[in-house]
Image (tube, rainbow, N blue to C red):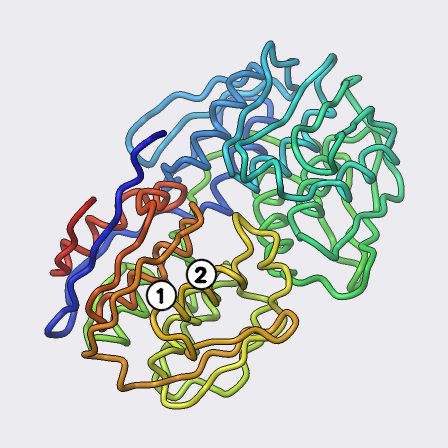
Amino acid sequence: MAFKPIARITPVSGPLTGQVRLPGSKSVTNRALLVAALARGQSRLSGILRSDDTLYMMTALDQMGVTITEVDDTTVDVSGTGRLEAPATPLFLGNAGTAVRFLTAAVALVEGPATVTGDAHMQKRPIAPLIETLVAMGVDARSETGCPPVHIRGTGGFEAGEIAVSGTLSSQYISAIMMLAAMGPAASVIRIMGGAIGAVGYLHITAAVMRAFGANVTFTEDNRIAIEATGYHARAYEVEPDASAATYLWAAEALTGGKIDIKARAHEMHQPDAKAHDLIRIFPRMPARIDGAQMQDAIPTLAVLAAFNETPVRFTGIANLRVKECDRIAALHAGLTAIRPDLARVEEDDLIVQADPTLAGQHLPALIDSHADHRIAMCFALAGLKIGGIAIDDAMCVSKTFPAYWQVLRDLGVEISGV
């Protein structure tokens, strides 16, 4: 069994100050990598995130005949031919949800068989609604369990027209079909089924990346997206800093009264999680109810911060957190109650955090199970800034999106052992 390091955090005695270079956005990087791969010619992507998730995406694209050349730590050249080759071996994507969902749709463009799979965690994450959509588009796609591995026998194309996609579990299904639709034989209209979309902001990120590479995407109604069959054109593209990663630094500022320069402003970010800045800015007076539907990856940060708020906080609109890298509602509840048994409770899909500012300065030993989920590991490190005895199990899972996280905290003055 592989060794899984435990990070032990020593509470800080003063404000955290310094400068931090944020990683690029994972959401934007994986979209840009795929769209650039589908374009004809060479694109230069700068500011990209280097992490497990994006490495899996680049490796899979390489398996399908796309040439990706490293220019420097945050820049790559992507050379595509406008098509994808059938991979000789399965596309293994770890626990990278964006890569699995996006590539499950994209491999419809290969001519021949392809298998999209991941690690044990990914093989428990649902993908049946996306498969059902692809089958309706004439794609031979199947999964024995409704989760990866997914087996596709591509014919080089798919049926365009009106496409129904479920919006109930993950916006990534819709984004996957959006990016595929621009490669169709004719224009398509995506019809989103199942009511309100939990994370509609991510669809606008997808559309922005597609437009940057020459696609024509129009949100004609709340539940309809029109996409012309333009294909994609190679170009230079800069990826913006990761707003989800920024939330940990914003929260560290708020908890310690510090000042951390991340070289990016929340209002200039297009990612939904940037909205969390408005809530972190008013800590310790965050509101009694926070709707997390449009900033789902920021909820773990906000939930740990809420433990130190002046008044309790109920998080709503977060049901989709149950189908992330782990069941994040359950993981947050488990971590908070490991610190103190009455610190949180769950009511259906709502998480209620019983705020207590006096937690700061206490010694409350707790080993937090990260569930191999980078966001659980990173958010509970924030608790360790103010509470003695906090340790994070499987701490290097942060490499999924923020490989330098522990070193960044050290550089700001946090004492951390074990990693």
Name the image quarter holding the N terminus. Answer: top left
Task: Name the residue located 43 percent from the left edge and 79 percent from the top edge.
Answer: 342
Location of the C terminus by quadrant is: top left
Q: Residue placed at 89% from the left, 39% from the top? A: 161
SS assignment at label 1: loop
Which residue has dot 1 on it?
A: 265
Compared to residue 266, the image places residue 418 above or below, namely above
How far apart in space, not on screen, are marks 1 and 2 (Cα)? Answer: 7 Å
Q: Height in image: 168 above or below 81? A: below
* Circles 1, 2 touching at the beta carbon (< 8 Å): yes
Q: Position of residue 295 (x, y in %)?
A: 53, 65
Work out whether residue 122 or residue 240 is closer to the camera in this orientation and state it: 122
Residue 314 position, x and y percent, is: 53, 80
Q: Which mark is residue 124?
A: none
Within-10-Å neighbours for mark 1: few <14, some 14–19, many 20+: few
Q: Position of residue 348 (x, y in %)?
A: 66, 72
Residue at mark 2: 269
Q: Kindly give the residue lying farthest to the top in the view shown.
A: 88
Amino acid at dot 1:
Arg
Image point (18%, 79%), residue name: 361
Q: Relative to 334, is 254 on the left or the right?
A: left
Q: Residue type at mark 2: give it.
A: Met
Task: Using the rendered view, name the quadrant where residue 156 is placed.
Answer: top right
Few, some or many residues within 10 Å of mark 2 (<14, 14–19, 20+): some
160 w.r.t. 417: above or below:
above
* Residue 146 position by quadrant: top right
Q: Secondary structure at mark 2?
A: loop
Would you say 79 lies left or right of 207 here?
Answer: left
| In the foreground, 310 or 152 | 310
Provide residue 200's location: percent of width, then percent of height: 65, 60
Residue drawn at (42%, 45%), measured in percent from left and top? 372
